[in-house]
């Protein structure tokens, strides 16, 4: 447990540092005053917690300060974390044990990863496969981002490095055909999961959405329930702009979950709160670094404590 929390602390270090800088080290222990409350408000906005969440956090801290003029930064941080935890109640996505859909229970469970180029989708596919493998599951990767030349090779490289099973074709191959072949392979080999890395860009948004729909139709010829999981991989450094991206994909593809990546490289760690508030799509994993083990299951408790600089 300690190791997991340490990953969150390290992953959100830039967000914590930015808040600490703007509030002159408020959470390190100094007393709250009117000026520090203004500083905290600005810091939370900058970290992309949004107007509504920032307002709720400040309201509770101000109420506590009104009752206790000796209120210190660490106490304010604990209040902020508690408010954030209430806001994120129900946000943890849990990948349930078991495979396949309700009608064909022995079929592989399909996780389709969706997202624009640059979101970290392809590396997330490999890291997720590795994590499931570490949990004792059997997994096949499908390299269906055939539009982008580097994507197939990138996934192959990760698969070799992490000793993962992969089904791939050449650049420009029909992505749905690759998905079809990968499902058959996963089924015949009795795999628990098939992870499908999809394209992040085609000539127009309409083309991209049609390709995603085609992959879905092909998979459903095998199993009407597939893909059981449709997760958007979104770059956490986009901040509040990621909300609109999530909304577009959700309308087109019916998202069932989120993976928020690159959080270790940004000070805008509050962005995932806005996505949850707006769309109520559960968050399954966070990308907190470059290594395979840095893809961590989303934990509300670890997240809220980490971004407010609290100890475990």
Image (cartoon, rainbow, N blue to C red):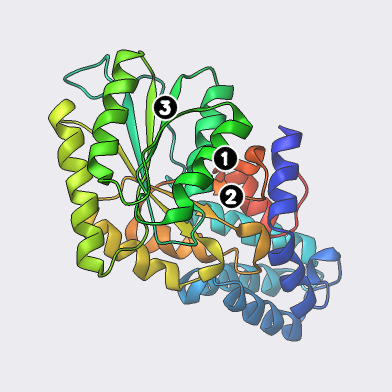
Label 3 crowd (10 A; few <14 / some 14-19 / many >=20): many
CA gap between label 3 and label 1 equals 15 Å
Decide if residue 237 is on the left or right side of residue 14.
Answer: left
For mark 3, what is the residue?
Answer: 140
Label 2 crowd (10 A; few <14 / some 14-19 / many >=20): many
Where residue 73 appears, x then y in whole percent? 78, 67
Where residue 289 appears, x then y in whole percent? 67, 50
- Answer yes or no: do the residues labelled 2 and 3 have beta carbons within 8 Å? no
For marks 2 and 3, give the one nearer the viewer.
3
Say if residue 45 shows up in the picture.
yes
Where residue 36 appears, x then y in whole percent? 75, 80
The residue that appears at 27% across and 69% down in the rendered structure is 203
Decide if residue 170 is on the left or right side of residue 62.
Answer: left
Total numbered badges shown on the rendered structure: 3
Where residue 47 appears, x then y in whole percent? 61, 72
CA gap between label 2 and label 3 equals 21 Å
Res 157 label: 1
For mark 2, what is the residue?
Answer: 287
Label 1 crowd (10 A; few <14 / some 14-19 / many >=20): some
Q: Compared to 106, does 152 lie above or below?
A: below
Decide if residue 263 is on the left or right side of residue 132.
Answer: right
Say if residue 228 shows up in the picture.
no
Query: Where's the N terminus, which quadrant?
Result: top right
Q: Compared to 252, does 241 lie above or below?
A: below
CA gap between label 1 and label 2 equals 19 Å
Mark 1 vs mark 2: which is more N-terminal? Answer: 1
The residue that appears at 75% across and 43% down in the rendered structure is 6
């Amino acid at each position: 447990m300690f190791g997991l929390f340490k990953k969150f602390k390290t992953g959100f270090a830039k967000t914590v540092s930015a808040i600490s800088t703007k509030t002159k080290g408020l959470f390190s222990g100094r007393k709250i005053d009117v000026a520090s409350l203004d500083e905290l408000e600005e810091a939370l906005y900058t970290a992309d917690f949004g107007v509504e969440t920032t307002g709720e956090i400040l309201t509770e801290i101000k109420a506590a300060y009104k009752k206790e003029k000796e209120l210190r930064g660490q106490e304010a941080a604990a209040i902020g974390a508690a408010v954030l935890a209430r806001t994120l109640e129900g946000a943890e996505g849990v990948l349930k044990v078991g495979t396949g859909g309700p009608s064909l229970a022995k079929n592989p469970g399909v996780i389709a990863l969706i997202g624009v180029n640059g979101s970290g989708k392809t590396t997330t596919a490999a890291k997720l496969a590795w994590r499931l493998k570490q949990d004792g599951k059997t997994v096949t990767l499908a390299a269906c981002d055939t539009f982008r030349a580097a994507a197939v090779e990138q996934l192959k490289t990760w698969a070799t490095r992490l000793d993962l099973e992969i089904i791939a074709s050449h650049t420009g191959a029909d992505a749905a055909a690759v998905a079809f072949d990968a499902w058959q392979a996963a089924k015949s080999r009795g795999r628990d999961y098939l992870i499908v890395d999809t394209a992040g860009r085609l000539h127009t948004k309409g083309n991209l959405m049609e390709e995603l729909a085609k992959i879905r139709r092909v998979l459903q010829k095998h199993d009407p329930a597939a893909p059981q999981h449709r997760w958007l991989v979104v770059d956490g450094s986009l901040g509040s702009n990621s909300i609109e991206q999530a909304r577009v994909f959700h309308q087109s593809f019916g998202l069932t979950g989120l993976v928020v990546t690159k959080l270790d490289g940004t000070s805008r760690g509050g962005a995932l709160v806005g996505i949850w508030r707006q769309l109520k799509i559960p968050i399954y994993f966070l990308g907190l670094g470059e290594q395979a083990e840095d893809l961590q299951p989303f934990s509300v408790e670890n997240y809220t404590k980490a971004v407010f600089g609290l100890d475990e």
